Amino acid sequence: MADRVKKDTRDPKVIIATRVAQELKDGNVVNLGIGLPVMVANYLPEGVEIILQSENGLMGMGPVPEKGKEDIDITNAGGGLVTMEPYAMCFDSAMSFGFIRGGHVDATILGALEVDEKGNIANWIVPGKRVPGMGGAMDLVVGAKKVIISMLHTQVNMDKATGEVKSIEKKLLKECRLPLTAVGVVDLIITEMGVVEVTAEGFVLRELHPDYTAEEVQEATEAALIIPDDLKEMQIA
């Protein structure tokens, strides 16, 4: 893989991307969604070779390019500039989605607006706002062998005029309120506060970031968290 960037473990998004990268195994074929998931390409562990796939038809996607080295013809599914590994190949959307629907993706990493304790995900529309459509998420979450959600634990809404916090919305819910992307597909949720596994019994807090307590994570989560005796510290180094 191309050179990784220096990690800033104070940045919540870097914390999330770094921890998500640890879930990926040598030789995995992994799809990265737009937004925060794209950052994972910059924090893959040394010595681990991951084949990154972008649904717009790129196999062998590399990290975000350095400033001054961008190529406007190499983009991810969201139109963001990326790089290509030496072995990369490009193909049309029909082949790309045939690959996804055929079960050849080991893991997909996506953002979400809401996830509930049954593993349902809503990540494509906020009613009343214009959006381009659901995109490839509906195929990815049912075609990939593992679905990992990477997102900030809560949504902080700011007053644009004053810069003050207007409200804080919880995103790990008892039941999704927004239109669903898919039902019962989420395996793991990684936020800046910890790692949450979706099980038949509900949300299980598997790892806790050292800056937070389990009580603080529960306060930021609508659904009840199961706290196991072997709760581990979230590794972000």
Image: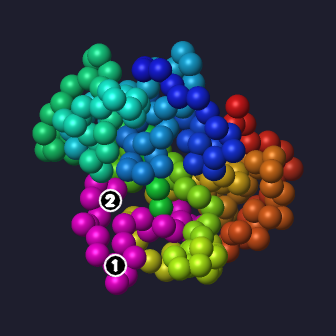
Left or right: residue 122 versus residue 233 is: left
Given contact means CB atoms under 8 Å apart, are the residues at marks 1 and 2 in contact? Answer: no
Front position among marks 1 and 2: 1
Q: Position of residue 166 (x, y in %)?
A: 61, 81
Q: Is residue 133 magenta?
A: yes
Viewer-nearest residue: 200 or 23: 23
How crowded is the residue under tag 1: few (<14 C-alpha within 10 Å), some, or many (20+)?
few
145 over 114 or under it: above or below? above
Q: Residue at x 67, y 61 (%)?
A: 203
Quadrant of residue 71 within the rendered picture: top left
The span shown in magenta is 113-138
**Comes first in the chain, label 1 or label 2:** 1
- What separation in Å lies between label 1 and label 2 (alpha carbons)? 19 Å
In depth, the one of 114 and 82 nearer the eye is: 82
Residue 37: which numbered mark, if any? Answer: none
| Residue with the mark numbered 2 | 138
Residue underneath mark 1: 129
Residue 23 visible at all? no
**Does 45 sit above or below residue 117?**
above
Badge 1 amino acid: Lys
Residue type (three-letter) at the residue carrying disc 2: Met
- The image quadrant where one finds the C terminus is top right
Residue displayed at 29% across by 75% down: 130
Predominant SS of the magenta segment: loop
Q: Is residue 220 left or right of residue 92?
A: right
Task: Report if residue 43 lies within the magenta region.
Answer: no
Q: What is the count of numbered marks?
A: 2
State which quadrant residue 235 falls in.
top right
Secondary structure found at label 1:
loop
The crowd level at tag 2 (other Cα within 10 Å; few <14, some 14-19, many 20+) is some
